[in-house]
Amino acid sequence: MSDLQEEGKNAINSPMSPALADVHPEDTQLEENEERTMIDPTSKEDPKFKELVKVLLDWINDVLVEERIIVKQLEEDLYDGQVLQKLLEKLAGCKLNVAEVTQSEIGQKQKLQTVLEAVHDLLRPRGWALRWSVDSIHGKNLVAILHLLVSLAMHFRAPIRLPEHVTVQVVVVRKREGLLHSSHISEELTTTTEMMMGRFERDAFDTLFDHAPDKLSVVKKSLITFVNKHLNKLNLEVTELETQFADGVYLVLLMGLLEDYFVPLHNFYLTPESFDQKVHNVSFAFELMLDGGLKKPKARPEDVVNLDLKSTLRVLYNLFTKYKNME
């Protein structure tokens, strides 16, 4: 961190940087000592960055489909607080006391202030860093907007998969003694799914994914053989671990087979249609695992439903270690 700060200080104190050639003229109309940040154009072309923006755009539009709101560009459509208000009201099931339409800059900032205060009330108890402000959102700072949306997606357990390890280069431009000075800093937008969910401990599956991906297929094959040995009794077969456990149905049925009991059909959704129904199924399967004497799964039900392979493998491996010697 100190190296990063030193680098930023050196760049600000140095003569005008050639990187400013990429900066739009309107971004250089600064007052003395004013500072402005923008994403380096090369970072905007990064496939993972583009994927993050698309995933968040699609998520917002799915949430707001009944409001007949279509967001096409995050910084242009979210800066005035109107869409953010609707998004938060829909996600949190609340109604904010704000004016519906505000044309003036003062009115927009007042609305933003109210919306962001409501967001902060949700996020502060979880100890999350709030890396945005009224001015940065209203100033169409895309990095700040992305930080806000990622935090909301995590808090409300959005049924989406955020790409991991998305980092952008940010150009910081500052006017000092009539000259523009620039520096580059790296801004991390997402980490790993587990870290974003608040799980910092690493286990054998982290190591497997990071350092021995070639052995992953061996583990998957062993688990497929194990689950099919039992599911075949119901004439069911698994070929894809990534997807076939995501709705929780096979997990529930598997627990019944492993513990030798019939699971009443009214306890779970045999043909789940919504994200919430799938989460219900996986949560119910986790309860059955606890009843069977297993430890609480490290994964969250939402992770399994969101097709997070590592989470699914952890759950199945838990079952494998206890029941592998069953006849």
Image: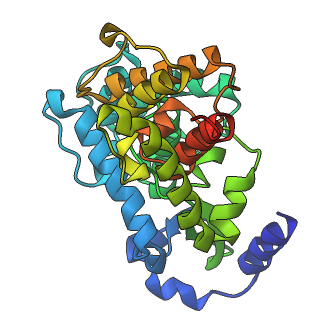
Quadrant in which the N terminus appears: bottom right
Residue at 57% in and 65% down: 218
The image position of residue 102, as x and y in percent, is 27, 30
Please identify the quarter of the rendering in which residue 175 is found: bottom right
Q: Is residue 201 left or right of residue 275?
A: right
Please identify the quarter of the rendering in which residue 248 is found: top left
Residue at 71% in and 26% down: 295
Residue 107 visible here: no
| Front residue (pair 274, 196) | 274
- Furthest residue to the front? 327
Residue 20 visible here: yes
The image position of residue 229, as x and y in percent, is 46, 43
Question: How has the structure been colored for display?
Answer: rainbow
Q: Total label count?
A: 0
Residue at 29% in and 37% down: 235
| Front residue (pair 276, 144) | 276
- Furthest residue to the bottom? 18
* 118 w.r.t. 237: above or below: above
- Furthest residue to the right? 2
The image position of residue 191, as x and y in percent, is 61, 55
Residue at 47% in and 18% down: 284
* 212 w.r.t. 74: above or below: below
Q: In this view, does 89 lie to the left or right of 254?
A: left
Quadrant in which the C terminus appears: top right
The image position of residue 12, as x and y in percent, is 72, 75
Q: Is residue 288 left or right of residue 25?
A: right
| Front residue (pair 297, 53) | 297
